[in-house]
Amino acid sequence: MKVFIINGGQHFAHSGGEFQKTLTSWTEEFFKSKQDNEVRSFNINNEYDPIKEVENFVWADLIIYHTPVWWFQVPYRLKGYIDEVFTAGHETGIYKNDGRSRSSDNPKLHYGTGGMLQGRKYMLTTSWNAPIEAFTTNGEFFNLKNEDDVFMGVHLMNKFVGLTRAEGFHFHEMEKGVTPEKIVEDKANYLAHLEKTFYQG
């Protein structure tokens, strides 16, 4: 399997991106430990050529996004990276068009089917200061919505270019609740998730 990992841990204000760096290393080590895998990664704090990044998306069988949650969105450098790379990927491997055809019987149908990355998968991980109870407790902030509902735009973006969603993984209380014991537990749970999702499914 060819795995492309995007480290979205932007350096800004009080954020040094250290957990995303650690998470990226866990992911790299996991997939490299499996036979016949190839792994590439990109850190959004680095400079890049959008055309060369398109090549990474076209090359990969699996794309993994690691992102912290900033004001209920991805960091602006990750959003800018996606905007630039996906735009560069128009008719060069990421998407051909929006899927509609003026020559069809109904040119209003089939929007979102012009992606060129069919047969490949993506996975999203998110890291929150919010506790899991903010999602699962009635009357709390997210009103029983889960993490993936908050990031529906990211999921639709990947669907638009033809990628199939693999079950993601979400980390909670990554500011107020971090302890050495929690990091050990999070790592074990995350690696078990990768094993189950990609090797036992």
Image (spheres, grey):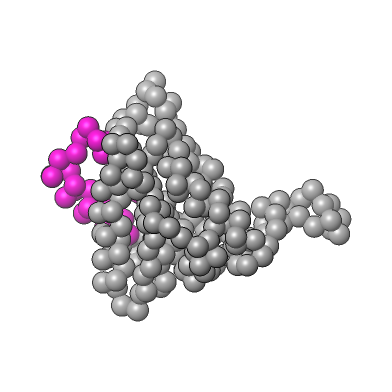
> Could you tell me residue 90's position as x and y percent?
64, 61
Q: Write the start and end of the magenta stretch as one range.
A: 169-194
Does the magenta run of residues contain 162? Answer: no
Give the residue furthest to the bottom. Answer: 36
Quarter occupied by residue 88: bottom right
Question: Is residue 6 visible in this depiction of the protein?
Answer: no
> Could you tell me residue 200's position as x and y percent?
34, 65
Q: Residue visible at 52% across and 42% down?
A: 152
Image quadrant holding the C terminus, namely bottom left
> Could you tell me residue 183's position as x and y percent?
19, 47
Quarter occupied by residue 127: top left
Would residue 198 appear left or right of 176 to someone viewing this image?
right
Q: Residue visible at 63% across and 67% down?
A: 92
Give the residue furthest to the front. Answer: 47
Q: Residue visible at 42% across and 42% down?
A: 75
Q: Is residue 84 above or below residue 131?
A: below
Quarter occupied by residue 148: top left
Residue situated in front as seen by the camera: 164 or 91: 91
